[in-house]
Image (cartoon, rainbow, N blue to C red):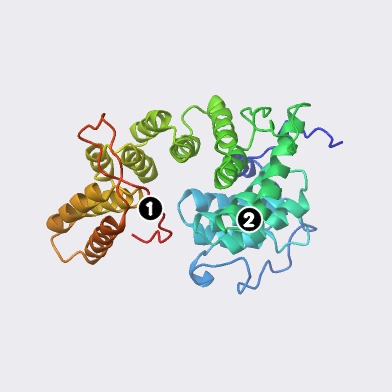
Amino acid sequence: MMRSIPATKKITAASLFALSLLLTGCASSENSAKDNSIDFEHELYNGKPTLSLSNEFPPETPQEAIVRGDRAYLANDSDLALYEYIRALGFPSQENADQAYYKIGYIHQQRKNYDLAKLAYSRAALIDKENIQYAASIGIVELKMGEQDNARKQLLRAVSMDQVRQGNKTYDPDKDTFARDLTVDELSPLNAYIGLGILADLDARHSDAQQIYQACLRVDGKSQKALTNLGYSYYLSGNLRQAEVINRRASTLYPDNQRAWSNLGLTYIKAKRYDDANDAFSRIMPQEKALNDIGYFAMLAGDYEAAINYLEQAINASPTYYAKAYQNLKRAKKLQISAPPVKLTNKRDAEQTQATVYTITDTDH
């Protein structure tokens, strides 16, 4: 049975940076590197030439190097931050090396250098095997890299450690009810839970995914990632009413979040509320592209009449020749001709069309 993990083992990205600012100490001759030089063909460095980075004397301790890195990071100089964190690894003493590796990984993740991020996070996790955030960060990067099986193992490991920390005896990842039995608190790695939710959605286990996102929102009701993923999960599962509620909330709270507006637009298209979809898409893209996207997704849904209408509007709205819209229009007309007839109900309204679903695997639109 896994032993309980103290709450102090849960370290977030923000708290790691804050913590290291408190780690300054007196220089120690035993701890100092002789020349504190490190080969900056270093596998974890990926930035501008290091000669131009700093005129300061070399740090005398790894803690000093980490503090310098934190200062550079907060000043938006991530190259200098990487340089200082890597210098922290060049001392005989490896004290706080896990923090240096984690921060190196964090910067590479922000830069989308996922291979380097995974390498750095993995080294941090080797030093501190019980750190929940280190395990979670590896899983998130693996998910971004498309390594779903590896990501699932790491994220489940992080969540399992977190459930043990909270003393949750009902949690069992092998049970069908595992999502319902999760407990989440302020110290939990929400990114790990959200990652598991994404994997559940990818496996078409939308109910599990929604329960996981909702557990995260009980801790942070304004979590951008939890809201956008929950709204998209409702859209995928066909619960358009809840999808609209959540996606509208996300786009209201975060008006610059393109994914929230995109999710809302997709929800309206699925409900055949095309004008509302146009309003949502127009927040994040030019009018002609919004009209093209509506026409494209209407075509995927088999609503060829609406698709042709909006694709023609996209062509007329474009200030230049819009090759993609012309291609989509040609395709929609061809599909409309070959589509079998559809029997209409007596409750046809202005939004309904003679539509049939046609499976199209090409998603390049």
Callout 2, which amino acid? Ala
Task: Identify the residue at horizontal 77%, vertical 52% (top origin).
Answer: 127
Callout 1, which amino acid? Tyr
Q: Quadrant of residue 210?
A: top right
Q: Quadrant of the C terminus?
A: bottom left
Q: In the rendering, at what x and y percent does residue 102 appear?
A: 64, 52
Taking the image as drawn, is residue 24 in sight? no
Circle on res. 65:
2
Q: CA distance from mark 1 to mark 2?
A: 59 Å
> Where is mark 1, residue-wise?
358
- Answer with left or right where residue 313 lies relative to residue 358: left
Determine whether the residue tagged by mark 1 lies in a helix, strand or loop: loop
Q: Residues within 10 Å of mark 2 (few under 14, many from 20)?
A: many
Q: Is residue 314 above or below residue 266?
A: below
Task: Identify the residue at horizontal 46%, vertical 41% (top origin).
Answer: 236
- Answer with left or right where residue 231 lies relative to residue 163: left
Q: Quadrant of residue 141?
A: bottom right
Taking the image as drawn, is residue 34 in sight? yes
Q: Quadrant of the N terminus?
A: top right
354 or 230: which is nearer to us? 354
Contact between marks 1 and 2 (CB within 8 A): the answer is no
Q: In the rendering, at what x and y percent does residue 59 appear?
A: 64, 59
Determine whether the residue tagged by mark 2 lies in a helix, strand or loop: helix
